Amino acid sequence: MNSRAYDLLGKIDYWLDDNQHIQLSINRYHLKGKNDYVSVTGEREQGIPTTSVKGTPEGEAPFNSVWTTGVTYDNYDLAGMKFNALAYYQDYEALFGSTLSGTFQDPEIAPVGTLYDQSRAVTSKYGTKMSLIKDDLWDDRLKVTLGFDTLFDSSKQDLWGTHRTYVPEVKYTDLSPFVQLEVAPLESVKLFGGVRYEYARLKVDNYQTLAASNSVTVEGGEPSFNKTLYNIAAVWTPIEPLSLFANYSQGFSMPDVGRVLRGINLPGMSVDSFLNLQPIVTNNTEVGFRVEKAPVDLEVSYYKSTSKLGSRVVRQGDVFVAKRQRTEIDGVEAAAGYNLTENHRMKLSYSHMRGRYDSDGDGSLDAKLDGLNVSPDRIIASWSANWTPQWSSFVQANWALSRDFDEEDKDFSGYALVDAAVGYKLPGKRGQLSLAVSNLLDKQYITYYSQSALVKDDRYFAGRGRTLTLGYRIDF
């Protein structure tokens, strides 16, 4: 795809007095294709990736357009407390490329297999985040944070070419008060704990699904959900430089409502009673240790996240749908750093993730999550150096390790990439120049997504080759 994009960010700060501060930020991002390339389907079995050639594709040029605005207010001495408030607003619109997707076919419009169409997503959201902190209690051992978050979201998805409803307008409200405590009963012990209450409400009017989903009429509704979530954590430093940590927390999120609603294909369904719209509640645990003693630092942790009614993204035909099943994801992360000198640092990290789900509803985790739902294991090694006060460099090698899945055609073969960058500080206050090279060795590889998430010739993509980025930065 040949495209043009721009990304503008502006911030204005103003101190009302020594303790009060406000900030306004505005971000405008826009990307639009030039509509002068067409896709050439690859051959997965032969290892030939999908590519593109000059041509005029069907439909309008795809684009992505976002406006984001935020206002922050900080008061560092509000009756001896710290107060922070953020209000934000975002408009998002995206038009996706035209395809012959089976989901878009409708014999009342055109013969099946001939109807090109493209989907458009439109979202408008606003909300607030507020917190009040008191951190000088019990001889500075106790810190208390009170907060309240809000989110109001309105979104829909339609088909641009035929003016059909793909996902009806969904209005979502989320209100979340919380309290968080941090206490240090001993110099070597820190304890954390908190409670968060989540209230969520969806509002959807009656709508009709596409012909590919049997053109059924779905009764709208206004379901609401609430959940009290808890978290607790501890950090213990029995001896310097060793720290042990453990935590437990609960998470709350809504499933991909758009995928759920557009996937309904049975008559008599109602938004109020549809189980797949239930929120995803996760139980998360983590344990590990940390060692920091110059010139070495090391951190190792194990984590696990479980959900009785998780959400798994699967492909059905030409669309992605959400399956609600018991899921579990666990893994290990390790990172080690070594300062060779004051100006040279080496770092090595490893991450391993395993995902499983209950495929047949018998309560056992009998199947592996695929590449749509878990990331590959990785080893990352890097070396950063400051050669002089002006010159600096960075080199990184990234190995995405091979992985087997239940479906053999989704097995991942792995690949290794090398990136590098060099920076130069200009004299005085004239800024800094940088030159970064991604995929330094220009290695051709098939992406993890193309190998292990989708098994389709037209989605068999190679990763980006050697890419040079020249940058200039100045602080004022």
Image: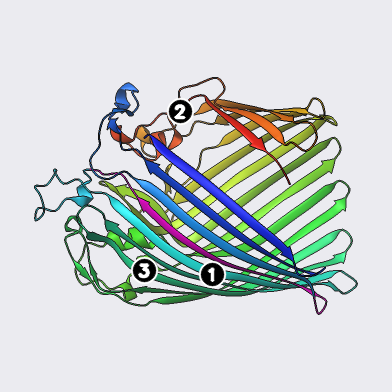
For this orientation, the residue located farthest to the bottom is 79
Quadrant of the image occupied by residue 222: bottom left
Which residue bears the numbered disc 3? 170
First along the sequence among labels 3 and 2: 3
- Quick check: is 83 in the magenta stretch? yes
Mark 1 lies on residue: 127
What is the three-letter code of the residue carrying label 2? Ser
Range shown magenta? 78-99
The label shown at residue 413 is 2
On the image, the x and y values in percent for residue 39 come to 29, 32
Q: Which numbered mark, 2 or 1, is in the foreground of this view?
A: 1
Is residue 392 located in the magenta-colored stretch of the structure?
no
Please name the amino acid that badge 1 sits on: Gly
Q: Can you give x and y, in whole percent of width and height, for residue 90 in the image?
A: 49, 62
Q: Is residue 371 left or right of residue 235?
A: left
Q: Mark 3 and 2 residues: CB-CB less than 8 Å, in contact?
A: no
Q: Is residue 197 above or below residue 417?
A: below
- Left or right, residue 200 beside residue 1: right
Q: Alpha-carbon distance for marks 2 and 1?
A: 43 Å
Which mark is first along the chain, 3 or 1?
1
Which mark is on residue 218? none
User: Could you classify mark 3 by the number of other residues whose Cα lies within 10 Å: few (under 14), some (14-19), or many (20 or more)?
Assistant: many
Residue placed furthest toward the top? 441
Distance between the alpha carbons at the discs numbered 3 and 2: 40 Å
Is 344 on the left or on the right of 453, as rendered? right
Q: Tell me residue 442's x, y (percent).
A: 51, 21
